[in-house]
Image (cartoon, rainbow, N blue to C red):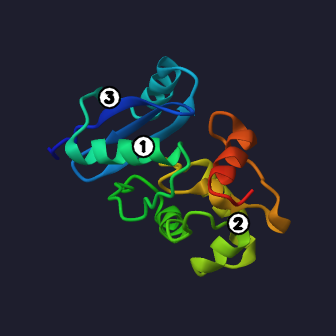
Amino acid sequence: MAPTTTHRYHVFETAHGYCAIAWNDVGVIRFQLPARTAETTERSLMRRVPGVKAAPPTALIKEIIDAVQRYFRGETIDFSALTLDLADQDEFFQRIYAALRRVGWGETTTYGTLAKAVGAGPEAARDVGQAMAKNPIPLIIPCHRVLAAGGKVGGFSAPGGATAKVHMLELEGCA
């Protein structure tokens, strides 16, 4: 029998609401963008990570929480070096997420450009959109930085929808 990996999570407050982060021994596995209440955030996380257990944050997770809190106060934060566990994700989505993590603070890209960055043609832009909709670690995998053709905001499946996306882009000075 294969060993099981314990998934842990912690809910915390930011200047824009309550976020949650989930992790295992490999890295971050899930992130919930701000919601109005801790309960809403916790329920959302628990639906997406069955069996996850509440736990105090490790030293590394505390550093990430601090960085997220600073991000939502408007500080320039680079999450690209954080270790993530995306083993449960489709290999193509993993490539998309890796390419997106290279889009830094204050920068944006498009679905089509991201498709090209992973060696796919413009017809894969819809696949990129699917990867963004299923992104388990928004903010850290900065799907808010992906725009539709012509610089349109496009969709955003996080709490607050496109309004939340625009707000995050405003924090970064690119909206």
Image: 101 above or below 1: below
User: 114 left or right of 76?
Assistant: right
Please name the residue that numbered disc 3 is placed on: 51
Please name the residue that numbered disc 1 is placed on: 30
Label 1 Cα crowd, 10 Å radius (few <14 / some 14-19 / many 20+) = many
Nearer-N-terminus badge (1/3): 1
Of labels 1 and 3, the one closer to you? 1
Numbered label attached to residue 154:
none
Please name the residue that numbered disc 2 is placed on: 111
Viewer-proximal residue, 172 or 108? 172
Q: Where is residue 79 shown, x and y percent of the image? A: 43, 59
Q: Where is residue 139 shown, x and y percent of the image? A: 52, 50
Q: Secondary structure at mark 1?
A: strand
Inspect the image, locate mark 2, and give the three-letter code of the amino acid beneath it.
Answer: Tyr
How far is disc 2 from disc 1 in space, using C-alphas?
22 Å
The outermost residue toward the right is 150
Image: 63 above or below 17: below
Of labels 3 and 2, the one closer to you? 2
Label 2 Cα crowd, 10 Å radius (few <14 / some 14-19 / many 20+) = many
How far is disc 1 from disc 3 in space, using C-alphas?
13 Å
